[in-house]
Amino acid sequence: MPKPVNVYPLIILGAGPAGLAAAHQAAQLGFKVALIERTLLGGICLNTGCVPSKTLIRTSRLYEEMRRAEHFGVQSPATIAVDFPAAMKRVRRVRSRIAREISAEGLRAQGVDLFFGDASFVAPDAIRVAGDVLRFKKALIATGTRPTIPSIDGLARTGYRTHETIFELKEFPNRLVAIGGGPVGCELAQAFCRLGSQVTIVQKEPMFLSNEERDAAQILHEAFDRDGIEIHLNTETVAVRSDGQHKLIDVLREGNRMTLTADEILVGVGETPNVDSLNLEAARVEYDAVEGIRVDDFLATTNPDIYAAGDVCAKRRLTHFESESSAIVVKNALRSGRARVSDLTIPWCTFTDPEIAHVGIYVREARQKEIPIKSFTVPMHEVHRAICDGEEEGFVKIHVREGTDTIMGATVVCRHAGEMINDITLAIQSGIGLRKLGRVIRPYPTQAAAIQIAAAACR
């Protein structure tokens, strides 16, 4: 452990994307920084979230493409044997490669004092970690989240997996039950299905991805059905038990009780902010156990010298928001800035197949705020490149303020939605109207032509 300085200009709790970005930016500005991490550098995204899940998703897509080879005029292999240990080995290899960019040595070389251990506030301007008390002028809480575990009778006793432990699997689960139909549950359920598991999703809500537009969620439902995923919506998991060989999941729908059988249970019902062990009362920082730390538009907490960034205070928990929010904190805390979260244009994407990406306002939000909008929708089966690629599923839907071409929001559902949403995000952020966006010359053929087609309809 380094020897603490008398008072740090900035102390950061959490070395995930938000904490690492803030430490790097502050050090570049010449500020002495202390960075505290409880477990692994890189946070959820690198170790148990985005990186391993997208790596496994890519492998699962390849297996699915091999099974559908005849659709592309290619003879499918006679047998397609899934090598699960090899797939998981690739996950670890990719994760290790990306982890090289994040090292304790690199942080120390930038002048960052790195402390490992559980941190807790002991005063409004002091934190205890590993026996040391560190004092600060400003602090950033970027402790992230952990998987929410529902209160289901027998779940803890029987055993389950979350995104934190699913990548530790040594044996392939022939039957997998996913509890929860949010982004994590949907992405991993489809990946394991395409690797060969018999997958069942149990979702308490009436649809997947309940925050997304209904027609987008419906397309995903149909894709899951084609993949062979068994779907139970409006269904509550009431108990879990074991018969000695398998896990038995009792579910209830409209008064009817049934039992599902699985080798593994994946819990993906959401995330809980990591706030309970920080002794935030001593820091005079208000928080909610479910919503996280309360911040204003400048990301300041109820203690004006303490800020929060990333998942621990965000309504939508996104890796790319973490780094952007930490930049706001560095500017406001260390340079007397007045940067606002509300000025950010943040897109997001669920990386299923097809992907579902969104930016800006939803139709339901526009109605609630009494904002008159007009929507332009282009089905992907009208886009030449999508036809060539055999990827005709989905649509591009762009909302503009009625009577103008000002883009208010958009939803993209297609194989490459996460890439295509970037054009629209740039337009919103830069104040570029839909008509002007449509005048951008694009190579032919590309799937982003759907944006151009939508723009052509905006007159």
Image (cartoon, grey):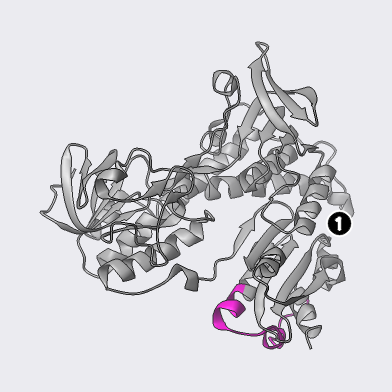
Quadrant into which the N terminus falls: top left
The quadrant where residue 264 appears: top right
Query: Going by the image, does 185 lie left or right of 168?
Result: right
For disc 1, the neighbor class at 10 Å (few under 14, some 14 to 19, many from 20) is few
Residue 305, compared with residue 48, is above or below; it is: below
Identify the magenta region: 425-445
Q: Amino acid at mark 1?
A: Phe
Q: Which residue is mark 1?
A: 72
Query: Going by the image, does 457 lie left or right of 22?
Result: right
Q: Position of residue 129 (x, y in %)?
A: 22, 41
* Residue lying at 60% horizontally and 78% vertically, measured from the top left: 428
Examine the rendering and report whether any part of residue 116 can be seen.
no
Residue 34, compared with residue 389, is above or below; it is: above
Q: Is residue 127 magenta?
A: no
Examine the rendering and report whether any part of residue 23 can be seen.
yes
Q: Is residue 430 magenta?
A: yes
The quadrant where residue 323 appears: bottom left
* Residue lying at 60% horizontally and 40% vertically, measured from the top left: 269
* Residue lying at 27% horizontally and 73% vertically, measured from the top left: 336
Residue 196, compared with residue 323, is above or below; it is: above
Front position in the image: 87 or 339: 339
